[in-house]
Image (spheres, rainbow, N blue to C red):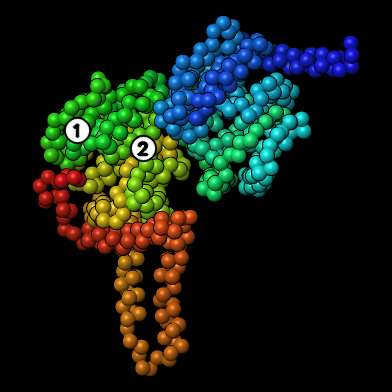
Amino acid sequence: MSCRAHGEHQQMSESEEKWALTRETIGSDRLSIIMPLYRLASEARANLKAVADLFERHRVETELVPVDDGSGDGTAEILESFQLENYEHVTLKPVVCRRNGGKGAALKAGFAASGGNYVMLLDGDLDINPKQTPYFFEEMVTKRADVVIGSKRHPKSVVQYPWHRRIVSACYFAFVRLFVGLPITDTQTGMKLFKREVLGAALDRMLVKAYAFDLELLAIAAGRGAKIAEAPVVIRFGNKFGALRPSTVNRMAMDTLAVFYRLRVLKYYAKCLVPKPLDHEPLVSIVIACPNRSWMLDECLEAIAQQSYGMWECIVLPDGGEKCPDDQRIRFIPTGKVRPAEKRNIGIRAARGEIVAFIDDDAYPEAHWLEYAIKYFGEREIGAVGGPGVTPPGDGFLARIGGRVYDNWLVSGNYRYRYRAGGVRKDVEDYPSCNLFVRKSVLDAIGGYRTDFWPGEDTLLCKDILDNWKRIVYDPWVVVFHHRRPLFMPHLRQLGRYAFHRGYFCKRFPSNSRRLSYFVPSMFVAYLVAWAVLVALPQPETMAAWLFVVWHGFVSVPILLYVLLVLLTTFSFSPVAWLLTVMGVVASHIWYGVRFAQGLCAGKAPCEYIGKDHPNG
């Protein structure tokens, strides 16, 4: 036998020994391979077959779980039609998410569908060769690790990586080591092996959905005491350039800093709420109050029909008779022209579910909306669950600017979490009905919504829930997309209604409305009036010129700082978007301050003595 042949034979023997170790480690159980396949219609079939063939050939009991995350390019159809015939050791369990929810949502869906005691996360484009799997199990066994990750910096790795990707990878690695300090050399390589209980505990605490998902996953696992080892990988990146837009880099950096803040400052992952598993699948009654049928309502119903959780009914409450869609789970109940609170109470009485989910007709839910919310209702002290209402990507330009205004820290302050998919899980005291789940027994106990206010009825509902000794929990994964009012007048009209009632509620229902942050815009308006008066005053003849300049400079410092903060917090690479957002923020502050002061001084809220109000009437 030649030296070359002898070397190849020895290499094959070593490889087979490692595959044998893999089989021995898995034992009578199976390996679950979760493969996210986003917009990979041209590669999906070949890649799935390549992975299935590899593990079948080496007789590894494998459960292949490909996940399509709302690709919309035909990937879902390929997964649904793909079959494995005459495979003894490999089974197929495809998961299709009808709407895109990000990598985190896709992997969560895949994990929920899987059952193996060992779970591998493998990017569906197969840039990383899964032939390295035995090395992962070898590291897990020899180092008694709970997690094994592929590392481009492992001395045995074979990496064909373009220079620009190497630079980005090195910079990000330095960034991660500086702020997070994980004892590993790579976080982003798309091949990772977990013990099931470790991955499940980490996924239960995840907050990031996309860019820094891998980092947060490993940070949680390490923070909970999991031992992480590294294995070599073979990466052939080809000619793909990858997405390196400034917005992508910025989002990655912000998500990474958020992980650092939650891990090192808040210690959030160690103490966050993880609800106990439900003992059954409760029926959810989705209630939608609306004036009439519209394209936005149809969009909402379509998204509801595509929910990953199937135990639901939907009750739509228009003014008049409307034609129902061809879905037995959707009921239309005409109500006449009454306030939203009255409509929702009709829906509550008609609801058959244990949980009632409220959503507006101008919003539509993310694909896992129901699934992520209902898990909390296994805790009896939790009465309600809410989540963010983010601006839909398809909104018009001025509506998206309206969304940027609401999302601005200077406008929403501590309540910014209502308008963006971020932040941490926490208890809240007030939440809007555009995205609110409430236990039916609680609604029955408090008598539903009060009907003498609009808007503001949801604030009173939350007050009654808290007064009933129940908690209201916010979860950033319970997402709906809420269409915004465009700048300027529609946005300001809506904001003005909210401000007036908040001012009125501050004195009448202070328990969840009398907060300093609500008074700040009115204080700002008072300052602007005082500043204008002081600036307009003539210079006294006895005052020295330098003293006059110093005085005017002193009273103008706050407004100069305010302008600087507005410019910084509204920055956009689009000058038009930046300018309009600046104008929107300033206008929102002034108008909210004026209307809040009016509500604070009012003897009655308008809807207490104006007949039947209506948002569109």
Q: Nearer the viewer, residue 35 or 261?
A: 35
Residue to which mark 1 is pinned: 317
Q: Position of residue 358 (x, y in %)?
A: 28, 35
In this rendering, the answer to whether 340 lies above or below 313 is below
Tell me if residue 448 can be seen.
no
Disc 1 crowd rating (10 Å Cα; few below 14, some 14-19, many 20+) is many
The N terminus lies in quadrant: top right
Tell me if residue 580 can be seen.
yes
Q: Position of residue 581 (x, y in %)?
A: 39, 57
Name the residue at 50% across, 30% down.
Answer: 39
Q: Nearer the viewer, residue 579 or 223?
A: 579
Disc 2 crowd rating (10 Å Cα; few below 14, some 14-19, many 20+) is many
Q: Position of residue 483 (x, y in %)?
A: 32, 43
Left or right side of 165 for 111: left
Q: Position of residue 403 (x, y in %)?
A: 36, 49
Name the residue at 58% across, 8% down.
Answer: 87
Q: Quadrant of residue 569?
A: bottom left
In this rendering, the answer to whether 504 lies above or below 465 is below
Say whether disc 1 or disc 2 marks the residue closer to the N-terminus.
1
Distance from disc 1 to disc 2, alpha carbons, whole Å, reads 19 Å
Per the rendering, the mark at residue 181 is: none
Looking at the image, the residue that sits furthest to the bottom is 542
How many numbered marks does the figure carry?
Answer: 2
Q: Quadrant of residue 357?
A: top left
Residue to which mark 2 is pinned: 480
Secondary structure of residue under mark 2: strand
Left or right side of 327 for 334: left
Name the residue at 35% across, 22% down.
Answer: 310
Instruction: Tell me which amino acid carries mark 1.
Output: Leu
Instruction: Tell me which amino acid carries mark 2.
Output: Val
